[in-house]
Structures are given as C-alpha cells and as structure tokens.
Image: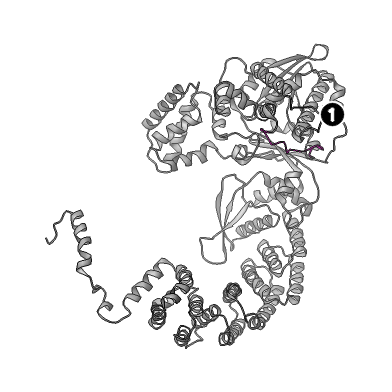
C-alpha cells in the first residue's frame, strides 16, 4: 500500500488493484480491516454516491454494474442503435471477486463513508475535445506508450513471464495470506511512470508541439478528478481515508500536484445530463472475449478461487467431475484424485505457487475427459466462464418502462436468465398468449430477449422461442422509454413510427404482421390505413407479390390470437386481384435473372394463397396461371414451373405432352433445360411416380449432343441437386429399369465377370476365403 499524510495529520492509504481478481479482492478486504478507514474512495463515477447504499441490500447479488446513461431521443427506425447506445451509456461492472465491490461492502458494513472518485460520468459520456487516437496504439508512442497501455505486461516480461495474466495470477491472485502486495505494486508503478515521463515522445499538454492523443487527455482529467475528490474528503474532516483504484493511478494520486492545476484541467469540461442506476450483469460480460477492456479470461475460475480459497484445485476438479457425470460420462473418484496430482505436478514443473487454470484444464482433458475435446468445451462453458446473472433490489432506480417489464415478467413467470433456454408456447392458453405478445412487443422495441425459433410442434397455435437476457437490454429499455412508459404503449408508438418511415410496401406489411403478433390493437388501424394507401398507389406487381405472404401470415396469426383482421382482409382481397391482373404483363420479355426473380415471387405467392384457403381467390389464381402458361415467348423456367403448379392442382391433363414438346429435338437445349428446372423446382417425386415424364426427361438427356450436354449440365445439376437424397436414389433406381428388358427385373443386373474378377478376389482375401471355394 502507499501512504500519505493529509491535512492536520489525517492519514491516506492508496491500494492499487487490478479490476476483478480474487487475490486482489481478499487483499483489499484484509488491508481495509487493518487500516480501519472512516472514508473509502473508490474508482468510479461520483454520480453513484447517491445509490451506493443499495449495495448493502440483500437483493443486490453480484455480478451487477453501475449504469450511467444520458436520456434523450431514441434512434430513428433504421439507425444503428448499437453505436447510438455506445455513445449514450457506460457501465462499471462488479463481481463478488472485484476489489472495488469488497471495498464498497466493507465500508457499508463498518459504517464508513463511501465515495466514488473518478471523472464524473457526465464528462465521460462526451469524448475529450482533443480526441485523436491515430497514434498507432502501443507502437506509436514507443516504449513509453507501450508501458502506459500494458504496464502489467512490462512487469511480467521483467519477471521472465511471457503471459502477463499468468504472472499476475502467480504474484497476486493465487495468494492467500502473507504480506500485503500493495507497497510493491505502488513502487513498481512509480518506476514505470518515471520511465514513461522520461521517454522523449511523451510530451505533456503544456509542451510545445501537437496536443496529446485523446486517451492521454482523458487519463490526465481522470487523475485530476481523483486528487480533487481526495482533497475534498480531507477537507470534510475524515482522518483515515482509503483509496482503492487501478494500480497505474497510485503514483498520480499521491503526487503533490497543486489544486489550482487540477482545477484548470477540469474547468470547462463539456457535460451531458446523465442518470445513474444499478443493473444486473453477467460473468460472460466480464470475460475478455466479450470486448470488455478490463475483462478477465475466466470469470468462473476467479469466482471459484474467491469462494473456495481452501483447496481450490481439489474442489474445482470435483465440480468438473459432477458436470461430466450429469451428462452420463463415467468419471470416478479415482479420476479426480489422479487429475489433482497431475495438476499439482504440472504447477511444480512450471514453478507456479498454485496450479492455475491452464494446469487444471490440461489435467481435466488428460484424466477426466480421457483426451476428448468436447467434454473439455462443456466444462469451459459451464465452469470457466460460469455464466451467471446478478440481481438488483426492487427499489433500484428504474425508468417506468423497465419497471413495467419487471412487473410483467413476474406476472407471467418469465424470470430473465443469462443461460439460453427454449420456451414452448401454446397460444390457446391465455398465459402463453400473453407471453408471446410480450416477447413480440419487446422485439418491436429492439429488445431481443426472445428470438423466435422453428417450432417443433404442428399448427399455427404453437411458438418456440429462445430466451437469453443480456445486460445491454437495460440500456435498450432506457432508450425505448422515449416511446412510452409501458411495454404495450411504447411498442405501439414505435410501430406507428416504423409505418410512417417505411419506404416500401413489403416493409409496411412486415409492420402490420408484427402488430398482429404483438397484439397491438391500438396501433393496427393506423398501420392498416398506411398499408391500404400504399397498396392502392403501388403499381409494381413485384412489390405486390412481395407484400402478399406477410399479409396472409398476419391473417392466419390473427385468427389464432383472436385479433380482429377485417381491415387486413380487405387489403388482401384487393392485393390478390391486382396481382392476378398484373402478373401476365410482368412476365413478358424476361432474361434469365429476371425470370428467376419472378419465379421466387410466384412460388411465395402461390404458397400464401394456399395458406389463405379462399376458394374464390384460388380459382382466380389458377385461371391466371392457365392463361399465362400458353403465352408465346414465356421464359422456359416460368413455363415449366407453371406447368407443374397446374398439374399438382389437378387442372392440367396434358403435362406429358407439354414436356414432350419442351424437350423435343427441335427445342433449344438451354430453354429445354430451363423448362425442366422449373418443372422440377418443387421436388422430384413426380418423376418417381410418373414413368411417362421420367422417360421423357431420360430420353432428352440421353439424346443431347456432347456440346449441348456440356452447356445444360449446370442447369441440370442445380435442378437435381436440390432434391432430397432419397428422391435422387429413387429416381436413379427407376431409370435403371426403364428399358423393360432383363434389367427391368430387380436382382438380374448383368455383371461382367472379367471386370468384376479382381474386386471379387480382393474381397475374398479380406474375408479369408479362397477364390472358388
């Protein structure tokens, strides 16, 4: 620890820590118990002083985070909401094994004052005025900048380690007892900062030349704020002040910098209007792989080290064995004992005071998992990261939208969890219907707590969701609160805004469908008016066909959910008529790409009308297709597809004759191939059950000249490649027996004994049988 004398004999102790480490957390707790401060200053936003007492509430269970956000207008539909929220919010996470959390809990338990001493969040949410980070990162500033960006890496290399995290684990996190590490940490950081100050390229803001990069400006502002908070605590009469901060800042806090200089550094900084609250956090968001700058590699391992300082390796491997046993993998007590011995032996060989995660993982793979990687990955996901979602008390400050969602989660028994889980809903049940509407409303607000999955049940009354709560959803709820104070009201307002901003008929139909799924009866009339107006003015048949499937789905869901769909039915009726009128002109003179695009739209519209199951619309659609299939100049792909649709509908009796003409000797091979591709685009079962059609296709392919066959081969491969494997096998078997001769009888395939002889002899030798026996 680093000590300093304050005003009138007051004593100051500064404890330099690394964020989120079990050894650091235990060392801070012991140091505070020995020092017995009457005030504890902690690196963090001072706006949190007003809500720090909530940390003592039994309902506050780490991991949690302080959230600072700047209220304002939400992003418009289509804006990049993720980057918008990055600019408007910031988190300060805490786990049970975070030194800052232990300092907060010690102060609250012992009645000491707690204050946060970093630069206010109101300033941090606005980038520094001189932000210019084109300095090349760790390489741009030479050794000085490299030390500043990774001080622990430099200390690790000086100690002979290639891995900074392994070095820090060995000297701090794996320690339990012994002398305090804080004096040595403060001395090391002082040496490193002196080296940075001596490096010639590290010019301060008052030096001649260009201004320093933005991150250096921000660092100077933060350390000035820390010193000013410390001076204020001493002026307030506290006699024993403890400061818990990142190790790099310790020398700066103890430096004798005039107050006037810090005041100049902080004077006039731009400020944002911010609010502060606590939100649940997860271990996954404490991991380096999440992108968190102060993240650790293995939150679950660190949580285990903090919770089980006594014999942590034995306890960890015992828990790992339990995980594997729950998956029906055989792991005995002898496996665990042998794995412990191997982990300890590896640690001894590598000169480590305690087996770390690397040694434990190697022992797990070699002994518990018997060299298999998949069980190791299972342990990694369940234990090394150890996904866990914290909780906050009910009286934590929340915007009304957050409060409304929390009430609905309790009423519907949908507790948020960081572990992804599937939720099966039966929309015939009132509670499941309400759950579905809630999840769809949240998706309209871009809070994707639930993501629809393919339902394993049959019928439109079933839905399957995958639920996984992420901490950033709280930010998204805060942003969405500009739309309203309840989930229903906010999602209805957002749907109305999306309808106004929609640029195409397909976008409007999507909004209408989502309103029906979410049960937003208040928003639906306005959306339907906009949809009817847009449909009446849009004369592009492609747009009309794109809109039809979503509208038909909306009608179907509306029936299942008991939502009134009268206005929607009127729009659908008009759309079907206009599609039938506009399709023939739109199909003229198409090239290959345009024909393929129209084919996809035609298939989707045909499927939608089959779902609609309206006799009048179905008859009108079939009449349109029948008139279109006989038009001269129709692209072969479309003609083949229309022939197949009409054949399947039972209203076309001369399909073999049409195919015979399409693949006749006088037909252009490319057009014939396109016709066959269109005809077979829905599957090849028709060839399995109709010998006449199969003979036509087989005869046409067999009769193609070599040059023509090479040209149409890609089209044929595309057509037949989309068939299921069983269909391809059945077609091949039918083709083998088309001739009607001896080969038509299964089991009588001719065999050439000369060609088969070598293979037969080889098989007999493998079986250990002499040829001819």
Q: Quadrant of the N terminus?
A: top right
**Would residue 283 be visible to someone looking at this image?**
no
570 w.r.t. 253: above or below = below
Residue position marked by numbered label 1 in the rendering? 265
Q: Where does residue 668 sit, x and y in percent of width and height? A: 49, 82
Q: Where does residue 768 sit, x and y in percent of width and height? A: 16, 53
Q: Going by the picture, which residue comes out furthest to the left?
A: 773
Name the residue located 42 percent from the left edge and 36 percent from the top edge. 365
Task: Tell me which colouring the rendered structure shows.
Answer: one colour
Name the residue located 74 percent from the left edge and 39 percent from the top edge. 277
Q: Is residue 275 magenta?
A: no
Q: For the residue carrying disc 1, how many other residues have a C-alpha within 10 Å: few (<14), some (14-19), or many (20+)? A: some
Name the residue located 18 percent from the left edge and 55 percent from the top edge. 765
440 w.r.t. 556: above or below = above
Under circle 1, the secondary element is helix
Q: Where does residue 692 sit, x and y in percent of width and height? A: 39, 83
Determine whether, in the image, residue 137 is placed left or right of residue 283.
Answer: right
Q: Is residue 135 magenta?
A: yes
Query: In terms of image quadrants, where is residue 128?
Result: top right
Give the residues drawn in magenta, as a range: 127-139
Name the residue located 72 percent from the left edge and 65 percent from the top edge. 521
78 w.r.t. 627: above or below = above
Q: Where does residue 173 sit, x and y in percent of width and height? A: 57, 25
Q: Quadrant of the C terminus?
A: bottom left
Determine whether, in the image, residue 64 is placed left or right of residue 349.
Answer: right
Q: Nearer the viewer, residue 33 or 248?
A: 248
Q: Nearer the viewer, residue 115 or 269?
A: 269
Q: Nearer the viewer, residue 577 or 671?
A: 671
401 w.r.t. 598: above or below = above
Q: What's the magenta bit mostly, secondary-structure-wise?
A: loop
**Would residue 474 be visible to someone looking at this image?**
yes
């Amino acid at each position: 620890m680093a000590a300093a004398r304050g005003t009138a004999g007051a004593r100051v102790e500064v404890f330099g820590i690394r964020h989120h480490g079990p050894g650091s957390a235990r060392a801070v707790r012991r140091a505070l118990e020995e020092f017995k401060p009457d005030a504890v200053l902690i690196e963090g936003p001072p706006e949190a002083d007003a809500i720090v007492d909530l940390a003592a509430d039994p309902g506050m269970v780490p991991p949690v985070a302080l959230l600072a956000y700047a209220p304002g207008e939400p992003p418009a539909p289509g804006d990049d909401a993720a980057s918008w929220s990055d600019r408007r919010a910031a988190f300060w996470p805490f786990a049970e094994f975070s030194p800052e959390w232990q300092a907060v809990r010690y102060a609250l338990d012992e009645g000491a004052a707690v204050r946060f001493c970093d630069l206010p969040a109101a300033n941090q949410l606005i980038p520094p005025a001189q932000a210019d980070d084109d300095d090349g990162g760790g390489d741009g500033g030479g050794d000085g900048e490299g030390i500043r960006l990774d001080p622990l890496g430099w200390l690790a290399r000086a100690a002979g380690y290639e891995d900074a995290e392994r070095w820090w684990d060995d000297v701090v996190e794996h320690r339990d007892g012994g002398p305090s590490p804080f004096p040595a940490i403060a001395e090391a950081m002082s040496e490193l900062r002196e080296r940075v100050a001596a490096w010639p390229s590290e010019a301060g803001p008052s030096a001649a030349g260009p201004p320093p990069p933005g991150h250096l400006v921000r660092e100077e502002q933060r350390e000035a704020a820390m010193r000013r908070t410390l001076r204020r605590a001493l002026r307030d009469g506290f006699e024993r002040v403890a400061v818990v901060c990142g190790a790099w800042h310790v020398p700066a806090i103890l430096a004798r910098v005039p107050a006037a200089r810090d005041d100049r550094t902080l004077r006039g900084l731009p400020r944002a209007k911010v609010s502060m609250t606590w939100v649940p956090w997860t271990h996954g968001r404490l991991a380096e792989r999440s992108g968190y700058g102060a993240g650790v590699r293995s939150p679950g391992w660190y949580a285990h080290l903090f919770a089980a300082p006594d014999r942590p390796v034995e306890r960890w491997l015992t828990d790992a064995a339990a995980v594997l046993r729950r998956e029906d993998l055989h792991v005995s007590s002898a496996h665990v004992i042998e794995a412990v011995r191997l982990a300890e032996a590896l640690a001894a060989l590598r000169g480590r005071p305690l087996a770390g995660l690397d040694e434990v993982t190697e022992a797990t793979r070699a002994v518990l998992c018997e060299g298999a990687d998949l069980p190791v990955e299972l342990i990694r996901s369940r234990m090394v990261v150890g996904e866990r979602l914290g909780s906050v008390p009910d009286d934590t400050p929340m915007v009304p939208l957050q409060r409304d969602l929390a009430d609905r989660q309790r009423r519907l028994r949908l507790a948020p969890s960081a572990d992804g889980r599937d939720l099966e809903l039966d929309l015939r049940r009132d509670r499941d219907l309400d759950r579905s509407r809630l999840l769809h409303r949240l998706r309209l607000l871009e809070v994707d707590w639930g993501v629809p999955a393919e339902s394993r049940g049959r019928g439109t009354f079933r839905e399957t969701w995958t639920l996984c709560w992420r901490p950033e959803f709280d930010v998204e709820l805060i942003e969405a609160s500009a739309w309203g104070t309840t989930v229903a009201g906010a999602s209805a307002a957002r749907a109305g805004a999306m309808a106004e901003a929609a640029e195409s008929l397909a976008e409007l139909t999507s909004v209408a469908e989502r309103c029906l799924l979410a049960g937003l009866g208040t928003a639906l009339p306005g959306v339907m008016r906009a949809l009817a107006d847009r449909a009446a003015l849009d004369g592009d048949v492609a747009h009309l066909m794109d809109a039809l499937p979503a509208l038909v789905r909306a009608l179907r869901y509306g029936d299942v959910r008991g939502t009134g769909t009268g206005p929607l039915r009127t729009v659908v009726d008009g759309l079907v008529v206009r599609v039938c009128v506009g399709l023939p002109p739109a199909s003229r003179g198409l090239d290959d790409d345009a024909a393929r695009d129209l084919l996809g739209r035609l298939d989707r519209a045909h499927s939608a009308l089959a779902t609609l199951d309206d006799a009048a619309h179905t008859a009108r659609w079939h009449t349109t297709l029948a008139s279109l299939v006989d038009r001269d100049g129709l692209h072969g792909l479309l003609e083949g597809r229309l022939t197949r649709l009409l054949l399947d509908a039972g209203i076309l009796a001369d399909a073999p004759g049409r195919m015979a003409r399409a693949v006749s000797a006088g037909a252009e091979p490319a057009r014939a191939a396109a016709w066959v591709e269109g005809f077979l685009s829905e599957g090849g079962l028709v060839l399995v059950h109709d010998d006449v059609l199969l003979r036509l296709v087989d005869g046409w392919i067999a009769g193609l000249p070599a040059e023509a066959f090479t040209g149409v081969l890609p089209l044929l491969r595309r057509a037949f490649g989309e068939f299921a494997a069983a269909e391809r096998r059945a077609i091949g078997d039918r083709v083998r027996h088309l001739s009607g001769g001896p080969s038509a009888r299964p089991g009588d395939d001719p065999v050439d004994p000369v060609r088969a002889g070598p293979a037969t002899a080889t098989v007999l030798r493998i079986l250990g049988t002499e040829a001819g026996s």
